[in-house]
Image (cartoon, helix red, strand yellow):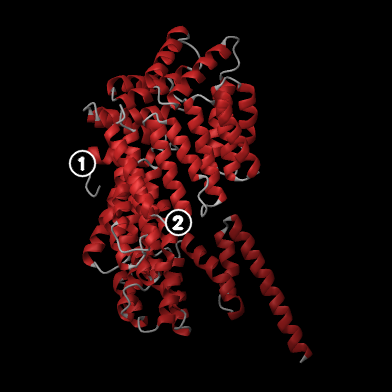
Amino acid sequence: MFLLFSTHKLHAQRSEEKFQVAEAYFEKGDYEKALLNYEDLVRKSDYRNKAYEHYRICLIELKQTKDLEKFLKKQVKSEPENLSYQVDYVLAQRMNGSGNFEKDIDKLIDENKKNPLAMDDLAEAFMHRGMVDQTIQLFLVARKQEREDTRYAEELALLYEKKGQKKEMVNELMNLLQGQPQRIEEVQNRLQVSLDDEEDYEMLVSALYEGLKADPKSLVYPEMLVWYHLQQNDFQGAFPQARSLDKRKMQQGEEMMKIGEMAMKHGDYNGALLYFNYVAQGNYAYNRVIQARKRAIDAREMQVRNTYPPDLPKILALSQEYENLLVEARDGNQRLEIQRKIALLRAFYLGEYAEGIKILERALDEPRASNRSKAEAKLELGDVYLFKGVPWQSALLYAQVEKDFKDSPIAHEAKLRGAKLSYFTGDFELAKAHLDVLKLATTREIANDALALSLLIQDNLALDTVKTTMSQYARADLLVYQGKLDPALVVFDSLLAEYPNHSLVDETQWQRASIFMKKGQYQQAFEAYDYIASKYKRDILTDDALFASATLLEEHLGDKSQAMERYKKILMEFAGSVHVAEARKRYRKLRGDKNQ
């Protein structure tokens, strides 16, 4: 026994040494010497698996594929359950022209299709050899055999992606969601990574509509279509499917309100009205219906705000709508918010400052409103005093809110308004000190606003004469804030005439363009935007000006060809711009693409 054990140990040691020698030759690319050492090892069961792969490669590299076929034929006969050997045998036959590859693969799949475990092993063997088409074929046969249309969807999606067959990939991802709808975010993220250009997105939306037509009861296609349209900021395009989902999934208007808020945030007030009016007219919870009615009035108010001169009958009508809603509202916070809206309309658009102050002060006594809602009303009361020309009262109210809600988002908002007040009144050093603190604010909007104003002050306080110029600019900015557009325009025009090469020129042109837009003077607005887009190639305002000028060309100046060129320039040269999604949508619409 001792002799037998010693002999076995010696043989094992020699085999290991031979294997290491073979591996060393293989790494050097000396396949002949490696083969001499591997040949003995592949016939030993304890080393066959370790030596097999490199042995196979050596035979292929040395063009000894007939020896490989002969070896594999023996292995298949001795180990018929090893499907990897069978796959390699079929491949060796193809190298030697001694078999019918397609028929042999069909036979392999057919012989194993009733055994799921064997099919898994066969799929692994195919993939190990990079046989993507054969793996797809196998999964489709297995799906048919198991009579499950969603089986192997994830695997097939990966394979089709490897082949660049993106439509088939999309179809399989939809199959995946049919069986596992909880993975919808994962699928959406994957599509964002996999789809590269306009053609890919056109294919996606076409595939989704085709799927919806073929299977109208599926929830997957409506959900994906809503997601697609929202990715494009196409809120009106998303509405039909969002409405369908609200009914079928009994969402009680919750998702419709969320999408309406997204549309408001992106300035699509017509789109927002679709969602808010839908909920306002629905059979939902009382407070939700009241909130939807209020937000619908808010959306119409935003449309009126963008009309110059202000349409006074419409403003009076909006004020009355808010008054009517106030009678029905029960929630304290809703009531206070409605009163805020009435006050701001009366003060900012009708010039009834005293009435606006009176309404806001009464709103602060709303017994069922939260302290947070009251603080927001106090901030707006400060704004009305600023409009009225009483900045010290504004400063006092802002400071009160900041003190009462230390280190909270609303305290940061109060500090930001205080910083803006300092900027408007020409105390730039104090304004910048507050703004630099706010750049680290917890909310992105406040931090971004603080950063923008801080940079404006910083970039324009370096020159000797700039403080005078900056004071003029800030005074004009306050006039814009107060809605006194013509006096503001006079100041901005004088700035350009007096300081044509000043660093404030781009901001001044932007302000002029915004005023011209409000006044409906679109040609003058276009010229101001175009000045920025053409003179400042990589300025912070360049992509904004480019997009604004493109929309003017499209919507008001009747030059859709030039608009397309500008949208295309945003897509090509400003990939990180916030306008990319909307520019893409508008470009495709002007190009005449379907499914917009």
Q: Kindly identify the amino acid type of the residue bearing the numbered disc 2.
A: Asp
Distance from disc 1 to disc 2, alpha carbons, whole Å, reads 48 Å
Could you tell me which secondary element the residue under label 2 belongs to?
loop
| Residue in the foreground of this view, choosing between 544 and 158 | 544
| Left or right of 370 in this view: 279 | left
Q: Residue at x 60, y 22 (%)?
A: 428
Q: Is residue 441 visible?
A: no
Q: Is residue 206 visible?
A: yes
Of label 1 and label 2, which has the lower sequence position? 2
Could you tell me which secondary element the residue under label 1 belongs to?
loop
Q: Is residue 170 above or below residue 585?
A: below
Residue picked out by circle 2 = 331
Name the image quarter holding the N terminus.
Answer: bottom right
Marking on residue 105: none
Single out the residue that lies furthest toward the top: 498
Image location of residue 254, percent across then percent down: 39, 60
Q: Residue at x 43, y 34 (%)?
A: 355
Single out the residue that lies furthest toward the right: 2
Is mark 1 in CB contact (under 8 Å) with mark 2? Answer: no
Image location of residue 317, percent across then percent down: 29, 40
Marking on residue 592: 1
Label 1 packing within 10 angstroms: few (<14), some (14-19), many (20+) = few
| Residue in the foreground of this view, choosing between 239 and 260 | 260
Foreground label between 1 and 2: 2
Q: Residue at x 32, y 57 (%)?
A: 279
Image location of residue 350, percent across then percent down: 36, 31
